[in-house]
Image: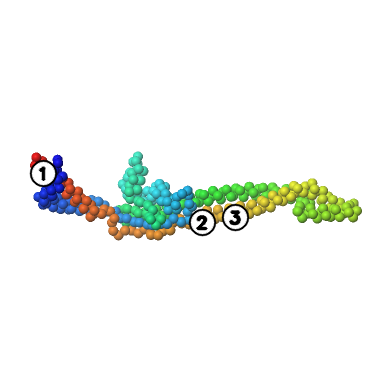
Amino acid sequence: MNNFFDNQRILRLIWRRKFHFIIVGSVAILLSAIFSGPKFIQPKFKSTARIYPTNIWVLSEESETEQMLEITNSRDIKLKMFDVFELDKVYKVNKDDPHYLTYMLDIYNTNVKAGKTKFETVEISVLDHDPQRASDMCDSIIHFYDKKVRDLHKAKDWEMVEISRKALKKKYAELDTLTERLTGMRKEYGILDYESQVERVTEGYMNALASGRSSTASSREIKGLYDNLAEKGTEARLMEARFDFLVNAIDSLTTEHELYLSEYEKNITYSHVVEYPTPADKKSYPVRWLIVVFSTISAVFLALLVFLILDYRKSD
């Protein structure tokens, strides 16, 4: 075995067997060219698209492009693709098979790729035997991505709509109760506006006492209002302050509610399509020249090993 892989010996063997190698190489070229043809290997066509993410939230430490990749590669979108394009028939996988999903995902992941480019776009590529279907699948992934992100945003926006609606309902209920109490106090005690009344009533009452007119009807009326302010003034002032606070809070909550509702109702896209998918006019798989070259080299190398073994045995 010491001289089995001797270079001089190998070169002499190649020269002696050159016609054999030519025959082996020619047969390998012929057979690989035949068996890599469309009759044996069904050709596949590639459709590609490139998209930028837009209008999406930044979550954790992921970039917007990485979020886009997470969603485009999600199982939800893959399952939708299975149903819409009836890929079980295309991939020839029986739905009743207990390993149906495993087989489908394996074939789908082999033919459909989504990855990030150096320019922070997401490139989607689809291989399929039908060039139009490959293009349609590529376009559908973009559509399903937009819908998925829209559904996620709408779910969060609706949650905020409901929160703000409940908060508004609570504030309006409190305002109605407070309004009823204020109305009752105004009718019963005549306290219409504590801030403006307290100073004037106190001044009028003091003037009546100073002038000795405290027994007149008007003075008695001022005295009654003065006593009401002394007894219920603090309560009235607190209720008025609470009333103003509730009005401002309702105004702010209404603005928030309308904003969340507007966000929920709008329908926008979440991707900028840089390159739209189109049906390919030339197959991408198989690459026949690669198959021919690889097969020829393999056949010639195998022939070399066989001839080396035969020559080695003969020399023994």
Question: Taking the image as drawn, is residue 140 in sight?
Answer: no
Kindly identify the residue that appears in the image at 17 percent across and 46 percent down. 302
Determine whether 4 is above or below 123 in the image. Answer: above
Q: CA distance from mark 2 to mark 3?
A: 17 Å
Circle 2 residues within 10 Å: few <14, some 14–19, many ≥20: few
Q: Where residue 60 appears, x then y in whole percent?
A: 47, 48
Question: Taking the image as drawn, is residue 230 in sight?
Answer: yes
Instruction: Identify the amino acid type marked 3.
Output: Thr
Q: CA distance from mark 2 to mark 1?
A: 80 Å
Q: CA distance from mark 3 to mark 1?
A: 92 Å
Using residue 186 as the reference point, say whether residue 269 is left or right of it.
left
Q: Secondary structure at mark 3?
A: helix
Q: Secondary structure at mark 1?
A: helix
Closer-to-camera residue (315/206) = 315
Kindly identify which residue carries mark 3. Answer: 255
Kindly identify which residue carries mark 1. Answer: 311
Q: Where residue 292 appears, x then y in whole percent?
A: 21, 53
Kindly identify which residue carries mark 2. Answer: 266
Circle 3 residues within 10 Å: few <14, some 14–19, many ≥20: few
